[in-house]
Each structure stands twice: as structure tokens, then as C-alpha cells.
Amino acid sequence: MALEPTQSPHLLPELIQEIVEICAEGSLSQAAALATISRDFNKCVRPILSRTLMCNYSSPSLQWPVPVKNLPRWLETNGKYVRNVIWGINVNDGVLQSIFERCPGITNLAIWVNTSSNDISNLLPAISTLRLYRLSISLSDLFSQHNFSEPEASSGAFRSITHLDIIFDGTKWEEFEGITHLPCLTHLSLPQQTFTPTYTKMINSILRECPRLKVLVLVAGRGFSSDAPVQASQVPCDYETHDGGNDEDPRLVAFDCDYVADWVYGATGRKDIWALADEIVARRLEDRKNLDYLQS
């Protein structure tokens, strides 16, 4: 006999929570189906399904993007559960302000907009109210009037950032040298571009001036289609990473991937390019350690 939605199976709350977590790891759609079993299951599933808010981006991996027109009601109920936000439509200050106010637990934020027609510099005060660990944004548009320098790096918006993904068209180190002042930064991602002397100098400067940096990822083929699965793979970096030197810096990794799908992978707890890069760097360091041991 099928259970009515209001009935609860005779299971301990701890067991229900474990069932929901296991299903969510395998498939969010499976976890969503559990919400119809009973109120107890629905109560456990709702926070999991509400962890990630996608506006105007959908993915086969995540079937619950929220239409902007439905956001106010959705935020009232679910905002406290949100940890990951991806914003991929024209900037609407009122809506974004509402998201930041209703979702104080956001730790992973991606703002991808057509910055030629959108000014995002006025979002800095609102972003500063969040305790972010991961940020994907155009710094040159966030600080549209000047370069990303030490005062900006010391602002509240960046005080806890460990993973920073910069979407930008510039290649000059002077525009982004504020990166060296980010107190918690360990992972940095940039678009891979043609290795002109200016671009190569910027990469070298980042590696030299950011000793606390564990990983520098160059992303090639940065796609924003939501149909392709993640295709992250290491590609060779055939240039010197130290001016005049011959040693390759083990922290430098390059990938080719679909960016929306990869972001969803990371937001839903699966292996993304950050995790893959960590594995590659760890393996390089171990190989170097073994080689030094053999040569000693």
C-alpha cells in the first residue's frame, strides 16, 4: 500500500537523513523524488536541493534553476539554505541585493554577465557582506574605474577568498597585482590566452609574487553551453614559467572544459577543475620529491 504524502515511514530521523544524503550524492533528481515520500523526507531534502541557486543557467546535472520572476517567493522559503549562486543574466541590482540579503550563507558566487552593457562595480558593498570562499567574476568590471590594487584586495569582499576565478580580457600584471594582497588566496584561475610576452610576464609575476598560491589554473575553451558534460583535461604548457629559467613551476595547470558544467560539478560536491588541479600538483610535487631523493 502506497504511503500518502503526509504519512511518515517508520524510520529514525538520522536514517532518513543518511538515505537522503546518499541519494543526493548519486543524483539530485533521485533526492528530489524522495521529497514526495513524506514530510520527514521533504524536510531533509529541501536544504540539499536549495544549496545551489542558478539564475538563467541550467545543466543536465542540476534540474532546478530558478526563474527570476519566481525568486522572491523562493528566497523567502529557501534563502537560508543557499550556499552556491550563479548569476548569468543582465544585472538587476534589486534582485541581486535581495539574493545577498536573503542568502547570508553564500560561500560560492559566480557572476557572469555581458559586462559591455552591465555595470557590476556597484555590487561590491553587497558582496562585502558575504563570507565568500569561492568567487568567479570580472575584476576589471567590478573595479571599473581603476585597477585591482591593495585597497580593493583588503576590502571585506575578499577577506576570506581561497578560490578566485577571474573572467577578464586584460593581460597586464599591473591591472591585477592586488592579487598578492589577498590574505587567504590559495587557488587562482585565469583564461588561457595567446602567450604573448605581456601575458607570459603576467603569469610569471603571479607565480613569483604569490608564494602562498598552491594552484594557478589556465582555462582554455571556456564554454558557457550547458549541454556538454565536463571535459576537463590537462594540456601542455610549453613556455618557461620563470624569466630566463628552465624549471617548470608545478603549480601551473591548464584545462579545457565546459565552464557551466564544471561549476555545477563543484557546487554539487563532485570533482571539478580545482580538485583535478590539486591532484596534478600533488603528483608533480611527489615526483619531484622522489627525483630529488634519487639524485641525492
Image (tube, grey):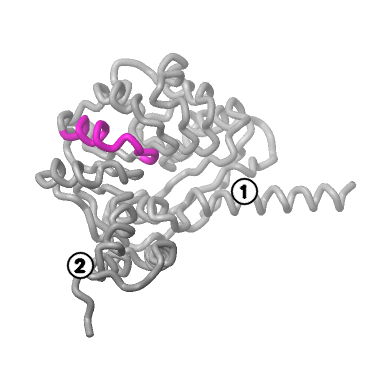
Which residue is depicted at the point 44% across and 36% down? 133
Picture coordinates of residue 80, whole percent (x, y)? 29, 42
The residue at which mark 2 appears reads as 6
Identify the secondary structure beneath mark 1.
helix
x then y, percent, for residue 6: 20, 67
Q: Is residue 69 left or right of residue 113?
A: left
Choose between 275 and 288: the one closer to the eye: 275
Q: Give percent across and percent down for residue 226.
A: 27, 57
Residue at position x 46%, y 32% in the image: 161
Residues 17 and 284: in front is: 17
From which residue to which does the magenta span run?
95-108
Which residue is pictured at 42% across the width and 52% down the height?
266
Helix, strand, or loop for circle 2? loop
Q: Residue 189 location, x and y as percent?
A: 46, 40
Q: CA distance from mark 2 to mark 1?
A: 51 Å
Task: Out of 1 and 107, give the one closest to the viewer.
Answer: 1
Figure quadrant of residue 268: bottom left
Q: Which residue matches tag 1? A: 281
Disc 2 crowd, CA 10 A, few/some/many (<14, 14-19, 20+): few
